[in-house]
Image (cartoon, helix red, strand yellow):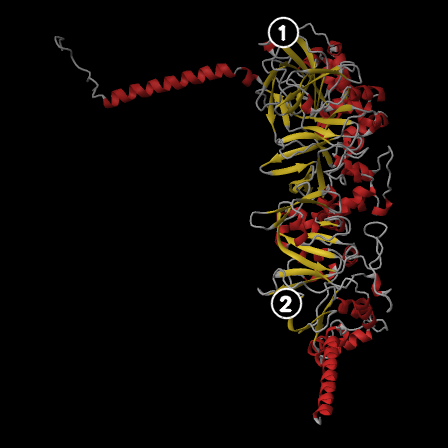
Amino acid sequence: MWLRPWLGLALFCLSVWCVSAVHSVNTSQTENLIDVLNYHPELSTFTHLLQRTRLLPTLNRIQELDEEDAGLTIFAPTNEAFGALFSEDVGGTLPDNVQAVLRQRLLYHVLNYTLPPVGPTLELYETLHLPSRKRLFEPTRPGRIPQKPQRPPEPGAEDHGGLLGNHGQHMRIQRNEAGQVMRVGVNARGQGGAQCISRDARSRQGILYVIDRVLDVPPPLDTFLKSHANTTLFRHINNDTMHKLATILHLTMFLPVDAAWQSLQPLEKAYLFSDLPQAMDDWLRLFGWHTSSESLGRDAVGYASLLRAAQPTRLTSILGGEVNITLSDQGQLQFGTARIVEEDILTENGVVHLVDGLHLPFGDLGMTLEKYLLALNATTYVALMKRAGLEHYINQDPHEPLRLGSPKGPFTFIVPSDDALERWLKSSKGSRSSIPRDNGNDIPPLREMLLYHILPGKNHDFAPYGMLSTELYPPNLQGRPQRIHVTATKGRVSLGSTKVIKGPIRAANAILYFVDDVARVPVDPMTTATQLSLTQFVRAQTQSREDVRVRKTPTMTYLVPHDAGFQAMGLVAKYLLHAHPHILEQVLAYHALPGLWYSDQLSSAWTTIPTWEGSLQSLRQDSKGVAVRSNISELLMTTQPDILTDTGVIHVVPRLRIPPSIPITLYKLAQISSAHRMMKLIEDAGFQWLWNETYHLELKSSCDRQKLVLLLPSDDAFAQLNLTEYYHSPELLQALVAQHILLVDDCNTTEEKHFDFPLSLEDEAKHPTLLDKSVGGTSRFGALALRHMGSPSDSHIGYMIGIKNARSVNNRHHAARITDFGRVSLPVVAQGLIPGGILTLDAVLEPYSPGWLRRWDRVWQVILLFLVLYSLYEAYLYARIRYGGYTRLQAGTMEGEEE
């Protein structure tokens, strides 16, 4: 009986203990995950930061409303991990009450679900961190559970947490073969991140993992591009542009590694990696070709696992083109033709896959000519092209349709150096700002100069000499392009007045040549002649009042004599410059040919062209240049062909040509020679027929054609001559005049001469005069001979003429220096005697009459020869007697003779 009370007491205690034990077990299984943190003193810093950032109510609220029992997963860094973090001053809190940056980082350590018991070795899992730049400035307030934001109104619009397209940021977790979590926050190779120290699963509402370091949230895109070892070339993108790229929503990026950029052409790399602000547009294009914001559907980020699961698939890039995503036989993802060498590099606004090649939809960067020029440091040239309104020549995208009004290429560009352009600007207007921008029909100097440096077509092989058309169309060429000279000798190329220092360079749809100077744009003919020192031509045009007409008349070809060509005309040039302006005008008009007669447009056959004067000139192409002839003058070869002007072309010829309408006679030449005394003597002696130009003399020539050349001593030459003696004897007067009239054979009429002499000046050449017996004269000393004296001077032309075999007698002059010359211009007859021209002398050639000794010189020569022969005979006889052994017989009785 006494045991009953004790038995009851024992049963009561046992029941109480059982109830207590059951209550204790139930309490440990339903405990909040936040309370579990309190059981870990090594996690006190983490708990404190959750409280400081007001995330504890948020996490509790998530657990309370977890109707699907998904639970939470918290990766809690130890106190030592935070101590190391704070000592490095990384991820420090912002000086505000909300601690927005710290909140984002702590939420990155929380998953809104528990991890499955098994899984791949490396796998991405979504966290509670919803990246948003805007949350740094408008952070959420503690209270309600953060909700996923509304869909943005348009792709790319900033929202309250949609940088990843309404998804949380991911972290990569590494498991061992048994499925246990080993490390979290690792990269695609399983490197980095934090190691799991322990696992606490005592709460039914989640699992707590203790890790040894604080996880870094994926960086903003700009931070990643600046820091990653394989994306260093993206650092050429400026900070503002990088910041904008980092705010574009839910990007899937396939970025080339540094080695992939080597596939670009050298000029493409030079441009892209320069500091030029224009290169930012191309960096954005490249980024857009390698990036998609709608990889696997709207707002979805293309992680590698999703891309593999979606095979085969095509991604639409930001710029609209589609790119194939394929899987190689080795299981490696490919972006177009490039292999993905590193997958799933997380950034704040998406994911980066590094590829080993560039994706260029057109096979190249699609650079405009402007960009090539900038890559070649032709910045001044580009700036001037834009200022002149010619940017449409250089900014056409090669892969886009030709814009309306743009010139159709291809083109060859002659690019002067920056220094040359600066010199041109200073010399033309004083400063570049003074050159106006004009897109109208009136071409200002800048546009004119730049268009002259653009050639249609791709020119990379040049002939030794030639001319090419340019894009400059001067009004005075009436719709025809201006030309530029091109010469190529021994590997050196000259374009216009410049030398090529670099080229040819292929750029876009063009060829570039860099030159050391600005090519001179052709100007009007008068200015061109002045620049070429053709002063006599300019003077003659001004004197004839034709200079304005020459400047402005369109499409003209001029045959311009150089200054030596005027001097080569002798008395003819003096006559023209002192004659009536109408005569000079007619002569100059004879050298003006309507039309554009470039040398390369002439054939080897003669082309007959009417002149302004009305007569005809004939041109043809020759191996030496351009040959010129007319029906009254000999052949001429141009000395400088194809000098370009803004109205046409100039061919420089060695001499002035006289048209048939302006005959140059002996009388006109005599008048301009200032030999008035000699002209009077000619008339007094009865030789007026010399001025009639028709001669009735018996011709004695081997080629049936002779010229009459008149020798005119100057008036000063008669100062020492006794004219009274000649006037007292008409025979002497006629002999004096006849001594000054040469007869010259004219057998070679096609020979080109450098001077317009009336006869060929050759040393020791002999020509008869009318006084010579060989042509019916009275004197054996009527022929004249030429003697070369050396270089010409102001007082003579370098030749002397004198009576053949004459000797000075009684101080009479029988030789004189030739001081000037002139040739008549009359139609050349087939045969007969024609007027040839005039030679002016500095002395009078008096007829030569030798003394009696000279007259009997042949008799004396015979007598002298006889005496010499007789003396030789006597010497011979003496030698024979002396050395031949003969003895003289003594006088005595002959045999048989009686004594």
Residue lying at the far front of the rendered structure: 1
Amino acid carrying label 1: it is Leu
Which numbered disc covers residue 349? Answer: none
- The image shows residue 754 at horizontal and vertical percentages of 65, 25
Q: Residue drawn at (55%, 18%), measured in percent from left and top?
A: 854
How far apart marks 2 and 1 lie (CA) works out to 131 Å
Q: Is residue 791 left or right of residue 206?
A: left
Asked if the residues shown at circle 2 and circle 1 are in contact, with their CB atoms under 8 angstroms apart, the answer is no
Which quarter of the figure has residue 344? Answer: bottom right
Say whether residue 231 is visible: no
Q: Nearer the viewer, mark 2 or mark 1?
A: 2
Which quarter of the figure has residue 796? Answer: top right
Q: Is residue 11 left or right of residue 786?
A: right
Look at the image and tell me in which quarter the C terminus lies: top left
- The image shows residue 750 at horizontal and vertical percentages of 63, 16
Which numbered disc covers residue 699? Answer: 1
Say whether residue 263 is visible: yes
Which quarter of the figure has residue 313? Answer: top right
State the residue in front, 629 or 310: 310
**Secondary-structure class at tag 2:** strand
Task: Count neighbours of disc 2 (C-alpha within 10 A) and say few if under 14, some if 14 to 19, many if 20 or more.
Answer: many
In the rendered view, would you say 745 is above or below 811?
A: above
**Secondary-structure class at tag 1:** loop
- The image shows residue 36 at horizontal and vertical percentages of 74, 76
Look at the image and tell me in which quarter the N terminus lies: bottom right
User: Would you name the residue on which mark 2 appears?
Assistant: 181
- The image shows residue 75 at horizontal and vertical percentages of 70, 70
In the rendered view, would you say 117 is above or below 818?
A: below
Q: Earlier in the sequence, mark 2 or mark 1?
A: 2
Q: Residue drawn at (35%, 20%), measured in percent from left and top?
A: 872
Amino acid carrying label 2: it is Val
